[in-house]
Every structure is written in structure tokens, then in C-alpha cells.
Amino acid sequence: MSREHSATTVLLERLAFPDCPRWHDGRLWFSDSHDGRVWAMAEEGQAEPVLAVDGRPGGLGWLPDGRLLVVSMLGRSLLRHDPEGLVTVCDLGRFSPHPWNDLVVAPDGRAYVGGFGHDVEAGDEPAGAPLVCVEPDGEAWVVVDRLLFPNGAVVLDAPAGRTLLVAETWGQRLSAYDLLADGSAARPRVWADLRPNVPDGLTADAEGAVWVADPVLNGVMRVIEGVGAVQWIPTGDRGAFACALGGSDGRTLYVCTSTTSNPVKTVRERSGRIEAVRVDVPAAAYA
């Protein structure tokens, strides 16, 4: 695996805990989860909070009609931002009583949302967690179960069909599923074994590879199916918790970093940052 020595550039700092970044409509959107707000940031770093969310905002995505979906992690619900405000699309608590996390929205509007499966802050041992498919009308079901902490997810579009990639943090792997027309997931397989790395948020590029954040070994890695990590960009003494490709040409890799994920410390220390580095391959057309 090649090592990059060029440092990232800090674009935004003094955040509590930035996570779940998405490039959308010319701006980088992300959740400052422990501060309860969703932000949008221009390519050059100018940023503004755009939405307050009770229960810690998590995963972000957009329906085909342009409306924003956001996970309320402690509220255990999937919310939609309508013109009149936030409305509940799905009560995720009926599938798991533990916090919920990141999501990805497929081109057909189905949202795939992962749960913690255990109480991380209480120090519980990891347990199998669900991945739930939520239809645009709110109908939902468990599409994959017993995942080892499903974290970031992307949908890869190819002539042969759509593939759902899920980062299993405690499994230290990327798992893949074929997405079928009815929203179900078939043919489970290991897309990449990432040991000793610990995957968190991820983003796809135009060559079918993905960049994956590692909050334990502090960096982001470019991963190829069946091969594993082929490139590494370190983030120093700061954990990399999520990343997104974006910018006007799709070649800016934005990285959410922090010195800690402990919510007591993050709110007090506000060490969260959005950092950026240029890469060679642009973002996938849809991911």
C-alpha cells in the first residue's frame, strides 16, 4: 500500500464531532452529531448550520425529489426535511433499541440505514446489528441482519447492476450485496478484508474503488475490490471518521476528523475538523 506524505488542508474547525459528509448541489453537507446540527459548506470552506436535529443527526441523503433525509441517532428515527419542517418517515426503534447511524439513499429513493446493535458509550461488547431498508413512503424491513456495526455505506452503479457496500467496523471489512428490484439484498460477500484497519465512513470514486476512513489508525485509504487498501493518507494524531469526494471537479476528498468520539469530550474540546486533500480519480456519478 502506497503512503501519502502530503498533509491535508484544514477547511473548517471548532466543530464538536463532524460525521456523515455528502457532496450535494455544490456544497459539502455533514452532521455535527454531538452539536445537534446539520451543516453545509462551500468548496472553499465557508459554512453555515442549516438544520437542527434532536437526538444527534447522523446519516444524510436525498430523495429523488430533492428532499433531505437525516437519521436521528438517539431518537431512533429516520426524518425527512419538508418545507414545513422535519417529519418522521420511520420509527427505527422497533428494529433495535440501540442508536442508529449512517445511511445511503439508492437512486430509487430507498434508504438503507444501519444500527449500532449495542451501547457503544456504555462499553458493551459488539453484537449483531441490523441494516434496514426504508421505502420513500416509510415502509421498512430488515434487509440484512447480524452485521458487525454497520457504519458507512455506498451504492455502486454498474451495467451489471447495483451493489450495496457496507463498512462493518468491528468486522474490519467491506461487505457487498447485490441490490434487487424489490429493494432486497442478495449474494452477500466480502468485498475487501481491511484488517488491521478499522473502516468507518466511505465514498466511491469513478473507477469503482472507495476511500474509507479509519478512526483507529488515523487516516483514509483507497480500497479496491478483492485487493484491499492500495493508498493511504494519514491524518496524524486525529481519527478519520468519515470522508466524501466532491468539489467542482469531484477530486477533493473531504475528511471528518476529531481527536475523540466521546460525546462528553467532543462538546467540551470542539476538536472536530473538516480537512481536505486532492486525489487523482473523481467521485462516482452516483454513490
Image (cartoon, grey):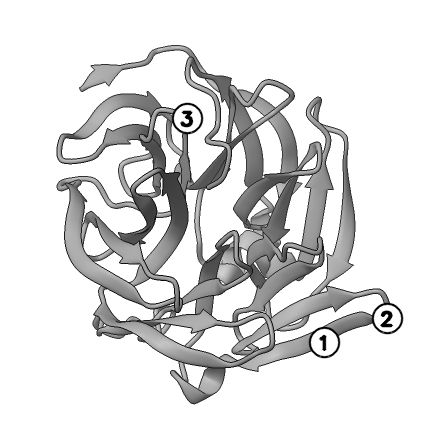
Residue occupied by mark 3? 206
Check the picture and name the quadrant holding the N terminus: top left
The answer to whether any part of residue 46 appears in the image is: yes
Residue 157 x %, y %: 40, 41
Are dots 2 and 1 in contact, CB under 8 Å? yes
User: Sequence order check: which comes first, mark 2 or mark 3?
Assistant: 2
In percent of the image, x 78 and y 52: which residue is there? 50
Q: Residues within 10 Å of mark 1 (few under 14, many from 20)?
A: some
Give the residue type that dot 1 points to: Val
**Where is residue 35, by image quadrant?**
bottom right
Choose between 220 and 207: the one closer to the eye: 207
In the depicted structure, whether residue 265 falls above or below residue 101? above
Choose between 86 and 170: the one closer to the eye: 86
Residue 62 x %, y %: 62, 54
Helix, strand or loop under label 3: loop
Residue occupied by mark 1? 87
In the depicted structure, whether residue 209 falls above or below residue 138? above
The answer to whether any part of residue 258 appears in the image is: no
Q: How far is mark 2 from mark 3, CA to CA? A: 36 Å
Mark number displayed over residue 84? 2
**Where is residue 79, by image quadrant?**
bottom right
In percent of the image, x 52 and y 62: which residue is there? 264
Q: How far is mark 1 from mark 3, CA to CA? A: 34 Å
Give the residue type that dot 3 points to: Ala
Helix, strand or loop under label 2: loop
